[in-house]
Amino acid sequence: MPAYKRILLKLSGEALMGDDAFGINRATIVRMVEEIAEVTRLGVEVAIVIGGGNIFRGVAGGSVGMDRATADYMGMLATVMNSLALADTMEKAGLVARVMSAIAIEQVVEPYVRPKALQYLEEGKVVVFAAGTGNPFFTTDTAAALRGAEIGAEIVLKATKVDGVYSADPNKDPSATRYTTISFDEAMAKNLQVMDATAFALCRDQKLPVKVFSIFKPGALRNVVLGGDEGTLVHV
Ligand code: UDP
């Protein structure tokens, strides 16, 4: 039995790169979609927010020297590309997917309209929220928190490169240990990196728990949804 009825899955753009240095790796996105399909087969309603870091980030790389807001809009457009790739791959795998954009781009994808998103989810369609929050100076982590709260998701599942929240950076400190659960207050007091500050505050205020887990571990998403000991649960 799944532990949740409706989830908001946050994927970083980098999760689509696989071993490539940039862009979307075909085998990687196909594997990711297989994991998502498994979860939908459990009867869980799935909404997804995907980042754009594999293509463009407002604060790094090609954006250096650019106007921040312009660079951020480019980053949001990168998330639209990833969303289209993800939805296309899902459709090929037999899922029904809908992309909804926070920025008006109607010839490409439909706009985000909350009641419609809720309807799609109730119909068992996977909804991909593209273009982040639609505003510069935010991140897709914040979009995940925002949409998660809006659609009444029971949890935000933050898929990352690391398999949870650690007491220190596990790449630098071999004695670092993974938390199974930690409260928002404790994570803040210990200055642990869960999400960016805006996303973190929103989840905490809305009492929306966050599970941090590894996207690279096969079966981890399914295990999380089944309530298994996987990653770190950040709770109120
Ligand atoms: N972005 C933005 N507003 C949002 C979401 C994203 O301006 O609400 C821009 C921002 O420039 C960001 C980029 O889109 O760097 C890609 O998103 P993010 O860095 O969150 O992607 P990820 O790191 O998850 O791949």
Image (cartoon, helix red, strand yellow):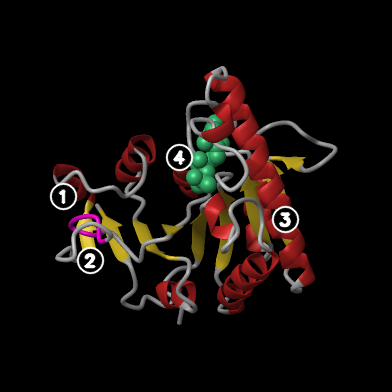
Where does residue 87 sit, x and y in percent of width and height? 72, 58
> Considering the numbered disc 1 on the image, is that residue within a helix, a strand or a loop?
helix
Is the residue marked by circle 3 packed among few (<14), some (14-19), or many (20+) residues within 10 Å?
some
Is the residue marked by circle 4 packed among few (<14), some (14-19), or many (20+) residues within 10 Å?
many
Q: Earlier in the sequence, mark 2 or mark 4?
A: 4
Mark 4 vs mark 3: in front: 3
Q: CA distance from mark 4 to mark 1?
A: 20 Å
Tell me the number on the disc at residue 186: 1
Count all numbered tags in the image, as a single digit: 4
Q: CA distance from mark 3 to mark 2?
A: 33 Å
Is the residue marked by circle 1 packed among few (<14), some (14-19), or many (20+) residues within 10 Å?
few
| Residue at the image point whose x is 67% and y is 36% from the top | 77
Q: Is residue 96 visible?
A: no
Horizontal arrangement in the rendering, residue 178 relative to residue 35 (left or right) = left
Tell me the number on the disc at residue 142: 4
> Considering the numbered disc 2 on the image, is that residue within a helix, a strand or a loop?
loop
Amino acid type of disc 2? Arg
The residue labelled by disc 3 is 85
Where does residue 71 sit, x and y in percent of width and height? 59, 26
Tell me the number on the disc at residue 178: 2
Q: CA distance from mark 1 to mark 2?
A: 14 Å
Amino acid type of disc 3? Ala
Where does residue 53 sit, x and y in percent of width and height? 55, 44
